[in-house]
Image (cartoon, helix red, strand yellow):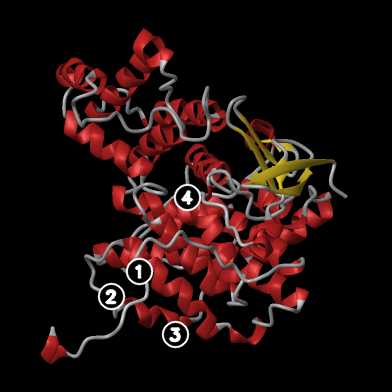
Amino acid sequence: MADKKALLTIEDKQLELPVYSGTLGPDVIDVRSLTGNGHFTYDPGFVSTASCESKITFIDGDKGILLHRGYPIEQLAEQSDYLETCYLLIYGELPSKEDKEHFEKTIMGHTMIHEQMVDLFSGFRRDAHPMAVMCGVVGALSAFYHDSLDITNERHREICAYRLISKMPTMAAMTYKYSIGQPFVYPRNDLSYGGNFLHMMFATPCEDYEVNPVLARAMDRIFLLHADHEQNASTSTVRLAGSSGANPFACIAAGIAALWGPAHGGANEAVLKMLDEIGDEKNIDEFIAKAKDKNDPFRLMGFGHRVYKNFDPRAKVMKETCDEVLGELGLADDPMLKIAKRLEQIALEDDYFVSKKLYPNVDFYSGIILKALGIPVEMFTVIFATGRTPGWIAHWHEMISGDYRIGRPRQLYTGEAKRDFVAVSDR
């Protein structure tokens, strides 16, 4: 039942539209009856449109709130870990001790990919962007694991979820190893999720690689802080693809493709490119002046956020992790990282940046951490995709499990009206 009604007057006709209230957030006006009355709404980018009903993640950008199933992101980052957050997103509740152990054991027990998939990599150029490779290999999962693709079967959906979460780090690390011509390093199920990823990224067959627990924890936090972010472009893409009945591997590949766009998943990559452009601490004042000049196209990357108007709740935890990693690795004197720390100080103290709420966001700190870990810039978005996988799965599963319809956005047509075809000889 609708809580309220909205009245819409079009010329001399008045329509009564239901207004619904969620647990949190703004009320929504149900405009579905407009189509039957000969009208559509016009909302480019769908920024004022609730495309679905969801119980997974809530964001209040004005107050800097991010909740996963009701739990604040700060509490999850400080007290939980990535796999437990995966369980929470998918199942809706925190696991019991026994459920947590079973979930972790199942995920870490299925980290290998079908050996024939290894041959896929040789079909790509070694200088291909890693996200291009990830789109291909994730989509190909449906060709190797087609035994559980009945989306109407809840157990099949669960198997697909486990396979995606467990195998994404393996495929991501293989993408990196292939790009630099090193042999693939197979997963070690005795390591943590983040530690196993670092091992697959940086170990080689010729010498032992010992996973640093501080760095493994940092990697886990990066995954956790990117696990879900409500109805963003890539999540909406996963839902739209899934609304056609496509298999989950294809849907996640579609999400990866959307995430690849620089306006979405490339923000932390842009941070490093900006630091590289600044080049030296002595150039900071010049670039700060450029950033303040509204007629200059230069923009500081990693500051402020489209959704969070006052502060990014993920950034505080990421800043702490950043300081831990730099301290552990002794990188306080790294030239690029010194530029980053100076920019951070300016953004937090300079009246111009404070007044415009251009605070360091999660992408700023995650970019610095990934650089410190030795991960190349072109791999940043791959890591983002790996962390975001449980969020994509949770939204796909929520939609498939409910009463859904195939997505079909409308348009405001401004092309030619009907006209008659003219033979080529008469044109």
The residue depicted at 63 percent of the width and 54 percent of the height is: 51
> Dot 3 corresponds to which residue?
116
- Residue 121 spot, x, y in % from top left: 34, 76
Res. 196 visible in picture: no
Query: Is 305 placed above or below 159 here?
Result: above
Q: Nearer the viewer, mark 4 or mark 1?
A: 4
Amino acid bearing label 3: Gln
Q: How many marks?
A: 4
Q: Are marks 2 and 1 in contact (CB under 8 Å)?
A: yes
> Dot 2 corresponds to which residue?
124
- Residue 111 spot, x, y in % from top left: 56, 67
Q: Nearer the viewer, mark 3 or mark 2?
A: 2
Res. 38 visible in picture: yes
Amino acid bearing label 1: Val
Q: Which mark is residue 133?
A: 1
Q: Are marks 3 and 4 in contact (CB under 8 Å)?
A: no
The residue depicted at 74 percent of the width and 79 percent of the height is: 152
Q: Earlier in the sequence, mark 3 or mark 4?
A: 4
Q: Nearer the viewer, mark 3 or mark 4?
A: 4
Q: CA distance from mark 1 to mark 3?
A: 16 Å
Q: Earlier in the sequence, mark 1 or mark 3?
A: 3
Q: Earlier in the sequence, mark 4 or mark 1?
A: 4
Q: Are marks 4 and 1 in contact (CB under 8 Å)?
A: no
> Dot 4 corresponds to which residue?
45
Few, some or many C-alpha atoms within 10 Å of disc 1 (few <14, some 14-19, many ≥20)? many
Amino acid bearing label 4: Gly
SS at mark 2? Answer: loop
